[in-house]
Amino acid sequence: MDEPVVQVAIDAFSPVAPKPGQPVVIKGRVTNTSSVTFESPQALACIDRSRLATTAALGAISTEQNIPMDDRDSCTNLTNDSRTFQPFAQPLAPNETVGFSLTVPWREWRITAHTGVYVVGVTFRGEPGNGERIMAGRARTLMPVIGQEPLTRTVNTALVVPLRHRPTQLGGRNFANDSLARSLAPTGSLGRLLSLGRQHKVTWLLDPAMLDEVRQLAKGYVVVGDNGQTTPGTGQAVAATWLKEFDANRRANQVVLLPYGDPDVAGLLDSGDPLKKLVPEARKTSQGYILAPAFTNGLWLEGGAAASRYLAAASGGFAGAAPDDLNLVSSSSWPTATRPVLTTTPVYDVLTPVGPDQTVRTVIADSALTTGGPDPETAASPLQVRQRFAAVTALIASSGKGTSSVVALPPRGWDSDGVATAELAGGLSLPWIKATDLTTVNASTPRPKTTKAPAAPATNGVLTDTQLDGIKQLESATSTMQKLLVDENALPEVMSHALLRSASTGWDSFPEEARHFAAVELGSANQQLGKVHLVNASVDRGLRKEIKVNLAGSKGTFPLTITNDTEWSVRVGIVVTSVNRTDLKIKRLQTVVLGPRQKWTPRINASAEQNGLIRANAQVVNAAGNPVGKSQELLIQASQYGSVGWILVGAACALLFGTSFVRIYRRIRTERRNPSPAEAAEPAEPADALHPEPLDVTPDAGTGDPAHDRPQANGAPGSVAPDASLKEGVGSKDG
């Protein structure tokens, strides 16, 4: 049977960093998460009296996760003063919660007056019904103590606050949901984060795609439901207020722009072409973003995405890349044993031998500042984050001389409501902290040391294969549309931005929303491509439409018409391919430019070696030969003679033309020998001229006497009357 346990949570701890002699107040709750009732329940303050003097020692605190709760003895209970423990008046039943408040006098800690950090906490003890008293729950935190010795240095601290949200804009005024608007409210995560800039100096890490969406919300928008119906958005006023505050705030705080859409850098680069091209495209888009006053173009990598191959590829190589671009990496990307030392400066030249540059200047955020703990189950609570931040910076302030700079950056997905980041910002008021920004920190180390980039697995993206496939389909449609345009730079910005949004890391925990977004944007892109299409009359064949074409003879032509219903000039061509025959030959056409609302009707030159029905597809293509829209099926009826037929036709034609030539020749010869003025004056008969009778091309046998056979004049024997001779030449009945 598992041991019965309860959940102990510390909700308040003050002061954050007590000085010797100050009492400490600890408040919190106990919730019985077991199925048994605890009799005589009690909460007690506890301490581990081992003084921790280095940041490395903080990272080595044991979590004791493999030790049964009742056997954990690293935190000793305080029982000498009644204020250090609190009995509860009633038994603690299952699912019941009870609060506690303990005040620990300084002497009860029994520790030295030197600066250091101690692990303290609260334990819960009670009887689970078997008569045995056990410790059934415990919560610990870090207590930095500022001793009698003065701190030796100030810690320049840049708190980087990410302002990002998963994409929700489907194009124009259409939004998938109202989650962004809710986040912008004063109680939402983005509303709470933005308010930090009013009291503290921070550095905004901003996704410009999200800012574009907020601007559209402020203008007015609608939410598109699953059934396609729209409802008016309710966050217009909230968005306008947020924008106004942001515009005022960023004049006092530095803005670092993420690549447009905050793309999954590792996932896109691991995918290869064509998706890897989206990384420099996203960086170029942010570089050209319009935001005054000036901003810094930045890159944010963590985990395996900080490996050399990603850092080298994403940090440069895009239009507008500049030396002052900022590369931000989390120290959690390295194993603890090989992590760069960050107690003096966070700026390093990271070795990138696989890239065009051998090193990349990088600012490394200290993940120890946001680790929380020391118990994993409560590590992410705002109070634990605050105490960890205070403990780490206090040790840095007391452990050396000269300038010290650190960068605190909440990891992705760490603070869904912005409360923990607000606690970090509160730590900027600690007496040994001087708030600064990333530009100042980066400039404080003109000649940084070098360090190796972290190792990483083969693939490190956060998007799934299914999500990447959806992005590939959208990229293909967008690329086809761009290559269709005569001016590729005229591609609508909404299309290129939608492609970058589809690759956002914000989709990590929202796969269904990611699928829906990519599908909607793909449909919009295909709709634009469909406006350039064939318009020839077609014949319905069930669900299929076919264009009928007759091809007579071995060669022939037929027309096809393309129309451009877009608002841009496009360059198009037509490719016809056979589906069921290999003997169909089509002469390839050159592409032509079609202006908006224009048509083009080229004649397709085709040939086929055999008779019969040919099924073919006519496809509109762009200048690169990529198919545009859906293909149109053709039915080509090829009708022609075989080789023997062609020989017979040729012989008949030769005979016809040969006999006609002989007949005409004989007629002309006779007319020249026996001219007749009367006949010459007579007009030719139309019937004979248009339809001559067949000529007799067989010579007369004659008499064998040349004198008799030779034509004679004046009615001499053997003579032929001129009339009769002419009529015989044209095939009369007397001939």
Image (tube, rainbow, N blue to C red):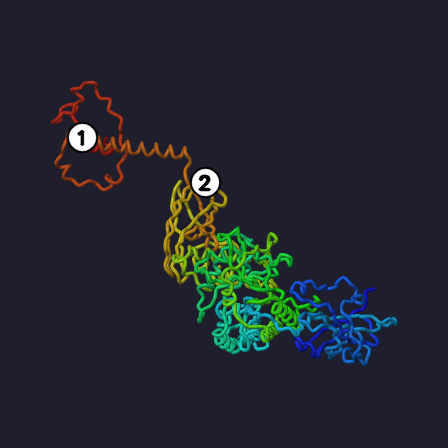
In this rendered view, identify the residue nearer to me: 50 or 587.
50
Q: Secondary structure at mark 2?
A: loop
Marker disc for residue 583: 2
Tell me which amino acid carries mark 2. Answer: Asp
Q: Position of residue 81 (x, y in %)?
A: 78, 79
Residue 723, relative to residue 296: is it above or below?
Answer: above
Q: Position of residue 5 (x, y in %)?
A: 78, 69
Q: Is residue 74 left or right of residue 583?
A: right
Observer able to see residue 259: no
Residue 403, relative to residue 555: is it above or below?
Answer: below
In this rendered view, identify the residue nearer to me: 156 or 470.
156
Question: The N terminus lies in which quarter of the figure?
Answer: bottom right
Q: Quadrant of residue 194?
A: bottom right
Tell me which amino acid carries mark 1. Answer: Thr
Q: What residue is pinned by disc 1?
A: 670
Question: The C terminus lies in which quarter of the figure?
Answer: top left
Q: Quadrant of residue 36?
A: bottom right
Residue 119, relative to residue 491: is it above or below?
Answer: below
Badge 1 density bin: few <14, some 14–19, many ≥20, Cα 10 Å:
some
Residue 728, relative to residue 225: is it above or below?
Answer: above
The CA span between labels 1 and 2 is: 54 Å
In the rendered image, the residue lying farthest to the right is 131
In the rendered image, the residue lying farthest to the front is 149
Q: Position of residue 668 (x, y in %)?
A: 19, 32
